[in-house]
């Protein structure tokens, strides 16, 4: 567990998510606005099924890692960042971040992503990936300003983009990670992660 301070002075705890967090994760989703839920899951997700909760919380912390931010006084969950390693490319992982609406734009998502990137590096993962609509030229321009971004073909109308994780995510390279997160927070950066792959099956 790590205790961190945000720019506004708020203190949060960051720790690995466990299977004991099922109820808290379900409650956290209910507190998200419909827009925030859509940005996270790329589909309307009013609630999480038992299979989805199992997929999201019963993880090995190597190929599938998730970190949760908790408010020390209330013990409420404030945000979750996770990666899932690619089967085809073991040095890459898809990344997703969700932050409670009233804690957005306070630097929490960036902090979670930096800690997640450090965990990924420790497990031999060197790149994060996500999806962006091929027709979204403004977003592709934003990605181009973040640093070395690799753009690949993906399914349908989306492109897969990959960002190399800095060797020391908690030190150097913060700017690119922050920019990557802003892309995700604006709903422009998606993921193929379909929790439980629509029916609860693990990937």
Image (cartoon, rainbow, N blue to C red):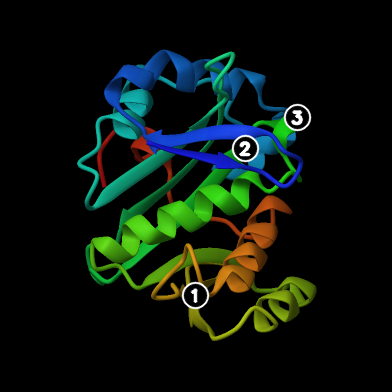
- Which quarter of the rendering shows the N terminus? top left
For residue 98, what is the image quadrant?
top right
Left-right relation of 41 to 121: right
Camera-side residue of 199 and 119: 119
Disc 3 is placed on an element classified as helix
Q: Residues within 10 Å of mark 3 (few under 14, many from 20)?
A: few
Camera-side residue of 13 and 123: 13
What percent of the width, then of the height, locates residue 193?
43, 49
Task: Give me the C-alpha separation between circle 2 and circle 3.
Answer: 8 Å
Camera-side residue of 51 and 149: 149
Q: Which residue is mark 2?
A: 99
Q: Is residue 157 visible from the viewing direction of this image?
A: no
Kindly identify the residue that appears in the image at 64 percent across and 56 percent down: 184
Q: Are marks 2 and 3 in contact (CB under 8 Å)?
A: no
Task: Give me the C-alpha separation between circle 3 and circle 1.
Answer: 28 Å
Disc 2 is placed on an element classified as strand
Task: Give me the C-alpha separation between circle 2 and circle 1.
Answer: 21 Å
Q: Which residue is mark 1?
A: 163
Residue 202 position (above or below residue 183): above
Q: Residues within 10 Å of mark 2 (few under 14, many from 20)?
A: many
For residue 192, what is the image quadrant?
bottom left
Kindly identify the residue that appears in the image at 31 percent across and 18 percent down: 20
Looking at the rendered structure, which numbered label has been put on residue 146? none
Q: Earlier in the sequence, mark 2 or mark 1?
A: 2
Disc 1 is placed on an element classified as strand
Kindly identify the residue that appears in the image at 56 percent across and 33 percent down: 12
Q: Is residue 106 visible from the viewing direction of this image?
A: yes
What percent of the width, then of the height, locates residue 189?
62, 60
Q: Residues within 10 Å of mark 1 (few under 14, many from 20)?
A: many
Looking at the rendered structure, which numbered label has been put on residue 102? 3
């Amino acid at each position: 567990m790590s205790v961190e301070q945000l720019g506004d002075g708020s203190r949060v705890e960051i720790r690995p998510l466990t299977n004991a967090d099922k109820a808290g994760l379900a409650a956290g989703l209910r507190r998200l606005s419909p827009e925030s839920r859509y940005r996270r899951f790329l589909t309307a997700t009013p609630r999480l099924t038992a299979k989805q909760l199992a997929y999201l919380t019963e993880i090995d912390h190597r190929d599938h890692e998730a970190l949760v931010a908790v408010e020390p006084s209330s013990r409420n969950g404030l945000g979750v960042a996770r990666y899932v390693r690619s089967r085809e490319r073991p040095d890459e992982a898809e990344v997703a971040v969700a932050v409670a609406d009233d804690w957005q734009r306070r630097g929490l998502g960036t902090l979670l992503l930096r800690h997640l990137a450090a965990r990924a590096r420790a497990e031999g993962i060197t790149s994060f990936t996500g999806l962006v609509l091929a027709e979204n030229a403004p977003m592709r321009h934003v990605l181009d300003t973040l640093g070395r971004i690799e753009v690949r073909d993906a399914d349908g109308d989306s492109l897969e983009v990959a960002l190399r994780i800095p060797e020391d995510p908690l030190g150097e390279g913060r700017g690119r990670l922050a920019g990557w997160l802003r892309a995700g927070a604006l709903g422009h950066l998606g993921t193929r992660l379909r929790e439980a792959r629509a029916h609860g099956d693990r990937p």
